[in-house]
């Protein structure tokens, strides 16, 4: 009897603790939801100025006192001459290169910031300017990356040159975004391609059946749910699910072909990925170059400006997303490892 009493007391404590934890998490999630409605802000940085500051810093530490004095004198003379020429109309004002970074998650939630960044750029950009988007993503949900690609297409529709730079990875949905560009540049060992569709669904039916647990699922419409996690899947359901995957793959291939008509789509749309050097041979990219080289070269003839839209996140929102981000990073690492070191 004493054992039952102690067991009941222990169970009550555990139950109370669990309820308390759930309540805390619910409160934090609620606070995070409220913070989502806070308006973000645009961060504009003149990268040309930053490049010039770095160059000046190096010069000051490498030149002798006399050499530095002459360098400063020549620089002032050059800047004064350029300012006068621009004022007199002898030379035109420098075009602008707007830089946007997109590091995509599985659900492409970063598209909300991308939308704001592109809207801001389009409000001031002209056809003489250019937009560079540095894409880093292994892909994810079709609808999320479809919307991200549509956002990039807004730039093309305004006849503003669009360049996509891939330093690490632009695969699957990431490449769906990249192919919209007028030009794609890639680092030599960046991962590109993976023009395919995948779906993985665990099924616990046998485990539930073994434990004498019944699962019921009611639907209206023959194909409302083709595959399920807990019920018994049928061959007919599997066939329908594969059919839907094939339809999505066809749409993906058509989208890539529309934007890069020179590609042999049947050769590259196998779900495989390639490193930058091979991707260039296949026509998936146009140039082998890092974004750093591209920006430094562009700064010689254009004003380089980075545009970033961000929300100020409080502790509650950071805490509520920590677990999901951790899992997502693990999945991404496994994805890359499985491709770089196939078994």
Image (cartoon, helix red, strand yellow):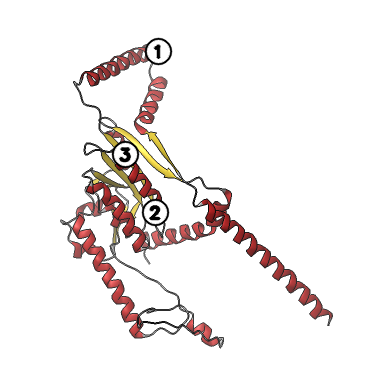
Q: Residues within 10 Å of mark 1 (few under 14, many from 20)?
A: few
Q: Quadrant of the C terminus?
A: bottom left
Q: Residues within 10 Å of mark 3 (few under 14, many from 20)?
A: many
Is 27 above or below relative to 8?
above
Q: Earlier in the sequence, mark 2 or mark 3?
A: 3
Q: Which of the two discs, 2 and 3, sits closer to the camera?
A: 3
SS under mark 3: strand
Left-right relation of 154 to 136: left
Q: Is residue 129 visible?
A: yes
Q: Are marks 3 and 1 in contact (CB under 8 Å)?
A: no
63 relative to 279, above or below: above
Which residue matches tag 1?
Answer: 65
Q: Quadrant of the N terminus?
A: bottom right
Residue 184 visible in the shown view: no
Instruction: Locate residue 152, reporting x and y percent.
Output: 29, 50
For marks 3 and 1, the one nearer the N-term is: 1
Q: Nearer the viewer, mark 1 or mark 2?
A: 2
Q: Secondary structure at mark 1?
A: helix
Question: Would you say 101 lies left or right of 88 here?
Answer: right
| Pair 3/1: label in front | 3
Please name whichever residue, 141 or 113, is drawn nearer the observer in this view of the structure. Answer: 113
- Badge 2 element: loop
Residue at far left of view? 262
The residue under label 2 is: 104
Q: Which residue is mark 3?
A: 98
Residue 186, x across and y down, in percent: 28, 48
Most distant residue in the right direction: 2
**Distance of mark 3 from mark 1, alpha carbons?**
37 Å
Residues at marks 2 and 3, CA–CA distance in whole angstroms: 19 Å
- Quarter of the rendering containing residue 97: top left
């Amino acid at each position: 009897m004493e054992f039952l009493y102690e067991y009941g007391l222990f169970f009550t404590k555990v139950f109370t603790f669990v309820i308390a934890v759930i309540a805390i998490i619910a409160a934090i999630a609620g606070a995070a939801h409220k913070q989502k409605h806070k308006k973000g802000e645009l961060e504009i940085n003149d990268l040309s100025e930053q490049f010039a500051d770095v160059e000046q810093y190096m010069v000051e530490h490498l030149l002798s006192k006399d050499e530095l004095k002459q360098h400063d004198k020549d620089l002032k003379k050059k800047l004064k001459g350029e300012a006068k020429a621009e004022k007199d109309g002898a030379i035109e004002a420098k075009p602008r290169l707007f830089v946007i970074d997109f590091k995509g998650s599985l659900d492409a939630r970063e598209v909300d910031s991308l939308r704001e960044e592109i809207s801001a750029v389009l409000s001031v950009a002209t056809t003489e300017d250019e937009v560079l988007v540095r894409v880093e993503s292994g892909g994810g949900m079709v609808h999320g990356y479809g919307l991200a690609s549509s956002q990039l297409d807004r730039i093309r529709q305004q006849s503003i040159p669009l360049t996509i730079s891939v330093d690490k990875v632009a695969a699957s949905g990431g490449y769906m975004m990249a192919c919209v560009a007028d030009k794609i540049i890639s680092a030599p060992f960046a991962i590109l391609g993976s023009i395919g569709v995948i779906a993985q669904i665990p099924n616990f039916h046998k485990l539930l059946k073994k434990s004498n647990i019944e699962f019921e699922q009611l639907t209206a419409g023959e194909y409302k749910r083709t595959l399920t996690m807990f019920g018994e899947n049928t061959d007919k359901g599997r066939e329908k699910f594969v059919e839907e995957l094939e339809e999505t793959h066809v749409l993906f291939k058509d989208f890539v072909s529309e934007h890069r008509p020179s590609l042999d789509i049947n050769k590259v749309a196998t779900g495989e990925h390639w490193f930058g050097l091979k991707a260039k041979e296949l026509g998936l990219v146009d140039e082998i170059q890092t974004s750093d080289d591209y920006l430094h070269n562009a700064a010689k003839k254009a004003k380089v400006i980075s545009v970033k839209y961000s929300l100020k996140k409080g502790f509650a929102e950071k805490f509520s997303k920590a677990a999901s981000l951790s899992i997502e990073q693990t999945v991404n690492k496994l994805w890359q490892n499985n491709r770089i070191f196939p078994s």
